[in-house]
Amino acid sequence: MSSALPTSITSSRQNILVLCLAFISGFIIMAIELLGGRILAPYFGSSIYVWGSIITVFMLSLSIGYLTGGRLSLHNPRLTLYGSFFATAAALLFPLVFWGDAIMEAMFLRIEDPRYGSLVVSMLLFFLPTAVMGMIAPYSVRLLVMDHQRSGQIAGKLYFISTLGSALGTLATSFYLVLWFEVNQILLTMSVVLALAGALAITVGRNSKAAAPVYL
Amino acid sequence: MPKINSLLRILPLCIAALLPAAAQAQSGTLNTIHQEKSLYRNILVTEDDVRRCMRFTITEIGGQNQSCYFLDNPDKLVFPYAKMVLTSLLVQDNPQRILIIGLGGGTLMHTYSTLFPQAEIIVAEIDEAVVSVAEEYFAYKSTDKIKTVTEDGRLYIKRAGLRNEKFDLVILDAFNGDYIPEHLMSAEFFEEVKKLLPANGMVVSNTFSSSRLYSAESQTYAQVFGKIFNIRMANTGNRIIVASQQPLPDKATLEQRAAAMGDRLAKFDVKPAEMIRHIKTEPDWDTKERVLTDQYSPVNQLNN
């Protein structure tokens, strides 16, 4: 039985990387949710039901992402897979940017009731990228946690950082980003940021594979 | 916190009794005769010796009067903006099919249906509560000529466009003072409105007259419609945009038409000949301001 102190999967520098990436994902999830209202309004209006649809879909997607991310964290948790969540989310924003209008137009024509129309469209546009981004939080916890005594504290620290990101994402988007940029410009920039974040995590994960202790 | 609540309930009556409303001083006390919370806002109906008003507020105090009528003369228009809207009759008269986005107290609806009793009027109002308050306190009524649709204005216009419907006159009156729905102020929206206009169709828009938004909105209308009329008056924060598929008449033509109109609008307290001087035909905004689109429409930020 090893008497060494329990180690985490990630070194302390990698911990900082995970926290930064969690911040970014929190920021971007809220930015997209906020933009969701603007994206849907030209086709479904801005009545309270439309916001209800958007928030419902985000909550649902995140919850499924949490479950999936938690499950994935059971088998060989590693930075490379973590990074692939970001890269996948980046790619999943492309349909929203490039096919969003076509999808909304098609649903607008097929569905008379804007409540159901907005629900269907929200699912089509936001479910996949948000679910993938939902996988980030529980997986981050797995990467950061050293032992179960500190697991609550570390989870708290992670949610603090990522929710701070969410707060800033909400503020920055609604106060400034929409004032300076077009909706698609904001979305594409966030896609690029996600892709870079993913690339960074994958690279660091690959380079440290040889050195890192295997945590059982 | 019941004590604070009851204090807040008395406060608007105290403050409202002291504050001068719109352009005129209060006479006597102002009563809140009805209050209702809808999905979107607080609706207040107030009345004093002179007039009854509908007011939208976010909190119980404050807000602006959306719609008023004089108790002794319901036809007479209270607000300058309504008189400016009527001035657009100099551009196009005798609309047979009218679409009004935004009901308020139904002032414009009432005026147009009095002037053109045979016209078909459709009012799109997103807030059901506004419709019911208008029916109960402002004598608003749907008839075979007047139809109310509870729907977001943009959605109604979009679907009407798909059905290839035409409206001689589209009145955009959807904004209260607090919040502008971004999707009702974009080039794409104005294109959808334009699609509803027949050859001599006209759109009349009640909107704001200050801040960067003024230039952005004006420029967006100009891009979609070409030349527009801007009706501005000194004593109000509203301004009216008049846009048409056809070239707008020149001042001489306007004066001729005003003369021909004679006293027709007198009972509404509108004097077309006098209103002409408030019509601006040349851009008085920054024409380089960025046009508003569905992709870029930070209207509430620009409006501050």
Image (cartoon, coloured by chain):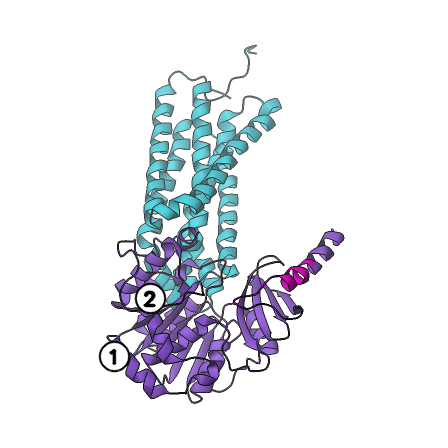
Chain colours: A cyan, B purple
Tags 1 and 2 on a common chain: yes
Q: What residue did someone put label 1 on?
A: B252
What's the magenta region?
Answer: B11-25
Is residue B133 or residue A162 the one in the foreground? Answer: B133
Q: What residue did someone put label 2 on?
A: B190
Q: What chain does badge 1 belong to? A: B
- In screen coordinates, is A185 left or right of A213? left
Seen as rendered, the residue at the extreme bottom is B118
Q: Amino acid at mark 2?
A: Phe
Q: CA distance from mark 1 to mark 2?
A: 28 Å
Task: Tell me if residue B259 comes above or below residue A17 in the rendering.
Answer: below
Q: What chain does badge 2 belong to? A: B
Quadrant of the rendered structure where residue B47 is? bottom right
Asked if the magenta segment contains residue A110, the reply would be: no
- In screen coordinates, is A2 left or right of B221? right
Can residue B120 be seen in the rendering of this structure?
yes
Marks 1 and 2: which is nearer the front?
1
Residue A169 at what x, y percent from top left?
Answer: 45, 40
Label 2: state its secondary structure.
helix
Quadrant of the rendered structure where residue B135 is? bottom right
Contact? badges 1 and 2 (CB < 8 Å): no
Q: Reading the chain from its start, which is encountered first: label 1 or label 2?
A: 2
